[in-house]
Amino acid sequence: MHKFKRQFLSGPYIIWIIGFILLPILMIFYYGITDSAGSFTLKNIIAIAEPVHLKSLLLSLKLALLCTVICLILSYPLAMILNSLHLKHQSFVVFIFVLPMWMNFMLRILAWQLLLSNNGIFNTLLETMGLPKLQLLNTPSAVVFGMVYDFLPFMILPIYNAMDRIGSDIIDAARDLGASQLQIFMKIIFPLTVSGVLSGIIMVFVPALTSFVISNLLGGGKVLLIGNVIEQEFMQNMNWNMGSGLSIVLMVFVIASMAFMNGHNKEGEGTAVW
Amino acid sequence: MEKEFIHLSHISKSYDNTLVLDDLDLKIRENEFLTLLGPSGCGKTTTLRLLGGFETPDAGQIFFDGSDITSLPPNERKLNTVFQKYALFPHMSIAENIAFGLKISKKSKAYINDKIKYALKLVNLNGYENRSIDSLSGGQQQRIAIARAIVNEPKVLLLDEPLGALDLKLRQDMQYELIRLKEELGITFVYVTHDQEEALTMSDTIVVMNQGYIQQIGTPEDIYNEPCNAFVADFIGDSNIIDGIMLEDKLVKILGVKIPCVDTGFGKKQPVDVVIRPEDVELSDPANGFMEGDVVSIIFKGVHYEIEVHANGYDWLVHTTKMFPVGTHVGISVIPFNIQIMNKPESSDEKAVDVNA
């Protein structure tokens, strides 16, 4: 009776997992390997080899990689600066960085759409300075910019957390044993933050790879990512089979990149995503 | 003994307008086991961090083997530190931890391997090279921290409450280990602790500190038997500290009773503090003591009984191996040699404090 009761308590979660995670994935798999008549086929998956699909997949990988690298370059020094601040300032600055995450992300991207547009604040500024206007919106750069803007906190926080866990006595011990600032960084700080860096990479790379809203709003249909292609298959062409087939391919890339990162993460203390 | 090796000269240090050390002057000789002893906040850890180079003094200079090292960073000082919480590098194996300093100073592989073996043997952890830090107990981690420090052959080893996180039995074992290590290595140990028993057991010299001032420097025997003020007397072991009046040389009046002592030179009718160690108080028949009182409580402590005797308005703390049931009417006596006379405190840092460290 007691055992039954306990199992009963986990009921809602099991329903959640089945209804909202397992079932949709199974449906994607079903649609992905069947045609519109319901018979088995692999053509939806092989469709990734079509030049237009392949091009957007490669572009997605390229932009996601670029976004991840930029986030990493920005975040690591930032996390170090943050960590060196006085404790009471630290939590305030962390709060500042997390604050935008509480706002709807679509809203934030829409704001950037206005700011970057031909009559937006940047171009107006250029105009008043007598400089020629720039095409900012609807370029791959705008898309990468939007991704970096959106995903930067996901890179900063795990790195900052990893850095925060390094006790000051560990640093003191390294100095005491003769290490210079550079040696402390190379032998102590960096190795101990690798796990944070790896989770940051996953948390930025995966959403950047699969995003389609940012490229829709800041790319203006000119920057076609694999996410946009899948969205079009579902929403415009109503070809659920093709959309699902391409989703499976994208999922393979996501899982592969996570597995790759996980394989390199020996520490994995808490900052790992899975 | 050996020559003066380290000299902390007129050091002052404050944090956020709080004075931690005030004009501290301390000389440390070569090959001595010197302990900085005091309650938390007395400045002992700050003194050690100044020696290690982790802090710079606001005023004063630090001399090491004749040269001024006041502004030298820690990585250029020829001393190593053992930290309270071990501070081992969690991403390295034990061998890598021990080799850290040697690799920095670019020693050969063969030399490093020899050193690791030697250091592990010295701290009784043979064959632990490839174990991970997590697999060690607290005591073992502290031994590795010691090994990591001594492989660099420092001339001085700084130890910041290294046994503070260990349990009592282990702490006692490690005290003997540290004495043995000190003898085998033949280097100077500067040890920080708030544990008076640790200080008495291991040290050649004890420096008792309070509120940023040195209260007394001396051998463990000196500090225990001849405390120079009420703070030292109270901090080192239990004491009966009683207000008294020095009537003349070798005669003091406490609690309305005149008793002979051995101290001279305090002048006549001078108010003083009288310190009597609980083990020096003798209980006997009421007629044989200089004071009569009643046993208020008795606690069995293993080696001795801890007895409280109420006499002439004062609760005497007595350690004795004899049993006196509660309510017994007893006489109190102390031989003159065991009565310590001290001047009244001139400042707050010299007063007896209630320390539960």
Image (tube, coloured by chain):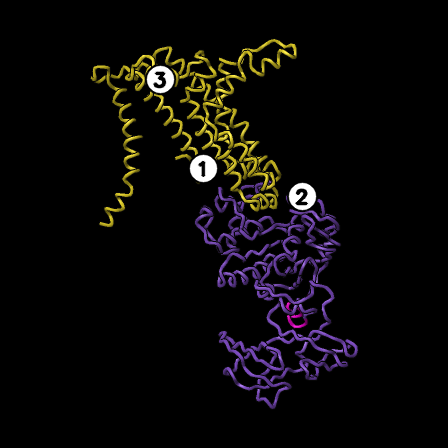
Chain colours: A yellow, B purple
Q: Nearer the viewer, mark 1 or mark 2?
A: 1
Cβ atoms under marks 1 and 2 closer than 8 Å: no
Residue B283: % across, % down = 58, 84
- Identify the amino acid type marked 3: Ile
- Identify the amino acid type marked 2: Pro
Magenta residues (range) = B218-226
Q: Nearer the viewer, residue B273 or B176?
A: B273
Cβ atoms under marks 1 and 3 closer than 8 Å: no
* Residue B104 vertical position relative to residue B339 in the rendered view, above or below: above
Do badges 3 and 2 share one subunit? no
Give the crowd class for mark 2: few <14, some 14-19, many >=20 residues within 10 Å: some
- Quadrant where the C terminus of chain B sits is bottom right
Instruction: State the SS at label 1.
Output: loop
Instruction: State the SS at label 2.
Output: loop
- Identify the amino acid type marked 1: Thr
Residue A35: % across, % down = 24, 15
Residue B288 as seen in the image, left or right of residue A69: right
Output the chain of dot 1.
A
Output the chain of dot 3.
A
Instruction: State the SS at label 3.
Output: helix
Residues at marks 1 and 2, CA–CA distance in whole angstroms: 33 Å
According to the picture, the residue beneath numbered tag 3 turns out to be A230
* Res. A180 in view: yes
The answer to if B221 sits in the magenta stretch is: yes
According to the picture, the residue beneath numbered tag 1 turns out to be A271
According to the picture, the residue beneath numbered tag 2 turns out to be B73
Residue A188 as seen in the image, left or right of residue A5: right
* Residue B177 vertical position relative to residue B239 in the rendered view, above or below: above
